[in-house]
Image (cartoon, grey):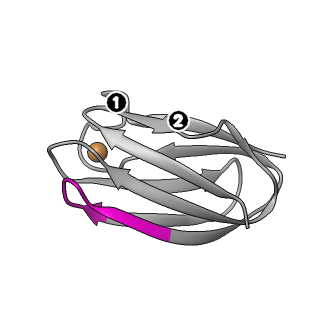
């Protein structure tokens, strides 16, 4: 199963890879920041593929998600975090 690591700091996400194959993908969410952050994985249409709840600093969590081909937006939903830069795009092939 392919994996992708998404690292959060104030205020951006860094992805270990820009593209993943469609199907089951394991996300590893790493909070390397000092504040809490969360991660939401949203396709262009339809329901979110998955999300990580608010995760404290130094927290690391794994979660499998089922992805269809397309472009996904990833963002942190805490107030103003997305506007400050916690937004990234993932291409699913
Ligand atoms: Cu955040």
Disc 2: which residue: 88
Q: Secondary structure at mark 1?
A: loop
**Disc 2 on helix, strand or loop?**
strand
- Residue 4 tag number: none
Q: How many marks?
A: 2
Q: Whole-percent x and y of residue 91?
A: 73, 40
Residue 3 visible from this viewpoint:
yes
Residue at left offset 36%, top offset 36%: 82
Residue 48 visible somewhere in the drawing: no
The magenta segment is 54-62
Q: What is the x, y in percent for residue 35?
A: 15, 47
For the point 59% across and 52% down, the residue is: 4
86 within the magenta span? no
Q: Residues within 10 Å of mark 1 (few under 14, many from 20)?
A: few
Dividing the picture into quarters, in which one does residue 48 lie? Answer: bottom right
Report the Cα–Cα distance between label 2 and label 1.
Answer: 12 Å
Q: Tell me what residue is drawn at x 55 percent, y 55 percent.
A: 41
Where on the image, by quarter, is ligand 1? top left
Q: Position of residue 12 (x, y in %)?
A: 37, 32
The verdict on label 2 being within 8 Å of ligand 1 is no
Q: Is residue 43 left or right of residue 22?
A: left
Residue annotated with mark 1 = 83
Are there few (<14), some (14-19), or many (20+) residues within 10 Å of tag 2? some
Mark before the other along the chain sequence, 2 or 1: 1
- Judge by depth and name the residue closer to the eye, 43 or 9: 9
Q: In the picture, which quadrant includes the N terminus?
A: bottom right
* Residue 75 placement: quadrant: top left
């Amino acid at each position: 199963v392919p994996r992708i690591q998404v690292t959060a700091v104030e205020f951006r996400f860094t992805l270990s890879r820009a593209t993943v194959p469609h199907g089951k993908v394991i996300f590893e969410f790493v909070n390397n920041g000092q504040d809490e952050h969360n991660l939401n994985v949203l396709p262009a249409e339809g329901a979110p593929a998955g999300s990580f709840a608010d995760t404290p600093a130094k927290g690391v969590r794994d979660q499998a998600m089922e992805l269809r081909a397309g472009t996904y937006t990833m963002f942190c939903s805490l107030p103003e975090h997305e506007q400050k830069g916690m937004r990234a795009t993932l291409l699913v092939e």
